[in-house]
Amino acid sequence: MTDTTEKEIIETPAVEAATPAAAAPAAGTRAPRGGDRGGRGAGSRGGRPGGRPGGNRPREARKSEYDQKMINIRRVARVVSGGRRFSFSVAIIIGNKKGKVGVGLGKAGDTSLAIDKAVRNAKKNMITVPLTKDSSIAHDVEAKYNASRVTLIPAHGRGLVAGSSARLVLELAGVSNIIAKMHSGSKNGLNNARATIEALQKLKA
């Protein structure tokens, strides 16, 4: 009895104690990241509960009441101990074509920042031009700024006859039926524009 029982126990195969809880993922496949936390898409601004409504909506650009024209844009360099530092200088004319006009200058390391500075400077230096009923000026006027000299003459029915940056100043000021003569050989657009502004300031209503 004892020999037979021991032989049967030895020949009987052993049963595995436990089976694995879950099968391992196949080779070459990756388990999804995030688990119960969710993927990255669930945490986007437009989808999360705490985000702003309409986060992907484009922002409407605010239109300025003034039109603007760029006279020139220059890259200037400043020599320092470590080398040269470059920045941008921008000259701009702004106006509402209803009698208000201004010239501004701005300088910054970026062109967009330089333009913003020039626009703010032009708004500070804005003038009001007394216009006649036909959008002209009342009398002749002459002015000088540095080496630039300009003469403005009313000319009824002639339109806007001007050149250089004086034309841009008169156009944005809303002046027509006028002749602008440049008496100097200066090619500096900023000085020509400021000479035109000086002439418009001398006008009497």
Image: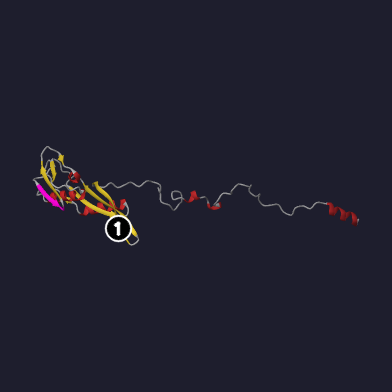
Identify the element where label 1 is drawn: strand
Q: Residue 205 appears at what percent x and percent y?
A: 9, 48
- Membership of 166 in magenta stretch: no
**Residue receiving disc 1:** 78
Viewer-proximal residue among 203 and 16: 203
Q: Residue 18 appears at what percent x and percent y?
A: 72, 54
Q: Residue furthest top?
A: 157
Quadrant location of the N terminus in the rendered image: bottom right
Q: Residue furthest right?
A: 1
Q: Residue furthest bottom?
A: 81
User: Main SS type for the magenta part?
Assistant: strand
- Report the coloring of the rendering: secondary structure
Q: What are the residue bounds of the magenta stretch?
A: 141-146
Q: Give the total number of marks visible in the rendering.
A: 1
Q: Residue 14 appears at what percent x and percent y?
A: 79, 53
Viewer-proximal residue among 58 and 181: 181
- Name the side, left or right, on which 150 lies relative to 56: left
* Residue at horizontal 53 percent and vertical 53 percent from the top: 37
* Other-residue count near label 1 (Cα within 10 Å), few / some / many at <14 / 14–19 / ≥20: few
* Residue at horizontal 84 percent and vertical 52 percent from the top: 11
Viewer-proximal residue among 148 and 55: 148
What amino acid is at disc 1? Arg
Q: Residue 109 appears at what percent x and percent y?
A: 32, 55
